[in-house]
Amino acid sequence: MTDLRLERSPLPTPRRRIHPAWWVAAVTFLALVGAAGFRAVPGLLIDPLHAEFGWSVGTISSAVAVNMALYGLTSPFAAALMERFGIRRVVTSALVVVAAGSGLTVFMTASWQLVLCWGVLVGLGTGSMAMALVATVTGRWFVARRGLVSGVLTAGGAAGQLVFLPLVAVVTERFGWRPASLGVAGAALAVAPLVAWLLRDRPRDLGVTPYGGTEADDVVGPRSGAARLAVRTLLDAARTRPFWLLALGFMICGATTSGLIQPHFVPAAHDHGMPPTVAASLLAVVGIFDLVGTVASGWLTDRFDPRYLLLVYYVLRGVSLLLLPPLFGPEVRPDMLAFIIFYGLDWVATVPPTLALCRRHFGTSAPVVFGWVFASHQVGGALAAFVAGVVRDELGSYDLAWYGGGALSVLAGGLSLLVRRHRQAAPSTP
């Protein structure tokens, strides 16, 4: 008897393709790397600009301060602009502005032009991405792995420093600061076409849901009144205690990283006889370990109370700054290398837990609220950059700046612990 049963062929195993959210995260990482390049340069150019133009460290530091302040103050408005015009348009425009600002510095002849190009243009361009971009991308494209992704994207700034800083130091030493500035401008500009081509605004644009989420997680925010949205969100958040605790803690974070170490470590090391290229290489090592520390912090943020993580990060940072002044010398000793490795691990490890606390307390308003918190970070950096330059001019040493930063870091740890554990009602948005 003939067997009439058809022989069933095995079904093909469906291929698991990479979720588009990871491609968006990769392009965002590259954009942050491109924007971070010029922000790593100021510490290397303080001595060359002083030698060529005779400007004091305080004068040059004022341009750094304007850059940092605008870098932070632009962030909350950038988050609102991304709601209005989309991520791709804002990021592409920002990269072009960064390239223009860094490229135009080669024509400057007066200190106000340094403030305009280095401070205003580059500050506005980098601020239009920065942490607002991290918060927006992680909030829109990810539900699962948000802490890890925010850590990886935050490390993009460190990667920019890692890639550019040693190269810029060598170019500056051999050919001068102008070719170095043009090279960084070209690198930032090269990322713009990739952003315009690959970056997408929302998961629904590609017909998918956020990674680890559902269609309900792809929420469209207000698409008009970007400035009004940013200001209104600030006013609502400012009525809550967690906002002020996070903002003050993050202000100290900015003062002790982008305000002190980033612009002043190289000239401080040079004061003690260390060649600028060697000091710049040490900052590049900070960048390497920052990648590790920030990604690890994101992983920890998904598993532990962010408040306790911030307490540990800030207190250990404060202790390391208090121990820093005796470590400077003409050569790299093991104790200085230990400081560099630790400071790299701790550099922006504070970002994932701070962002997590913003999401916990402010809900869908978290990207804009975090933009304002990050603005306080850069205001702190701007103040520290300027004050440290004045301290160096007046006292001939940076020691007092390091000790002050250490004491403030311990204070930031205490402020972080005061943030309430339970989520409060999220402020309303227009």
Image (cartoon, rainbow, N blue to C red):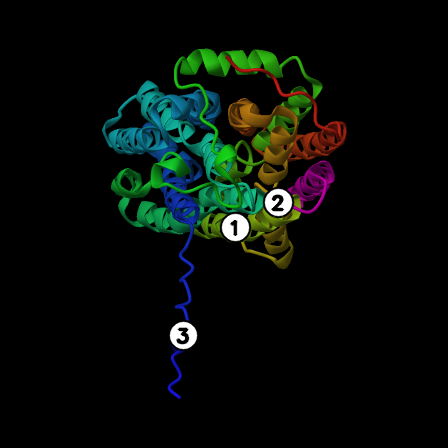
Q: Which element carries disc 1, helix, strand or loop?
A: helix
The image shows residue 111 at horizontal and vertical percentages of 34, 21
Span of residues in magenta: 302-326
Q: Which element carries disc 2, helix, strand or loop?
A: helix
**Gap between marks 1 and 2 measured at Cα:** 10 Å
Residue on which the image places disc 2: 346
In the image, taking residue 115 as reference, residue 423 lies left or right, namely right
Neighbor class of circle 1 (other Cα within 10 Å; few <14, some 14-19, many 20+) is: many
Quarter of the rendering containing residue 96: top left
Residue on which the image places disc 3: 8
* Residue at 54% over, 22% down: 372
The image shows residue 184 at horizontal and vertical percentages of 31, 41
> Would residue 163 be seen by someone viewing this image from the given angle?
yes
The image shows residue 300 at horizontal and vertical percentages of 66, 48
**Gap between marks 2 and 3 measured at Cα:** 58 Å
Quadrant, the N terminus: bottom left
Mark 1 vs 2, N-terminal side? 1
Q: Is residue 343 magenta?
A: no
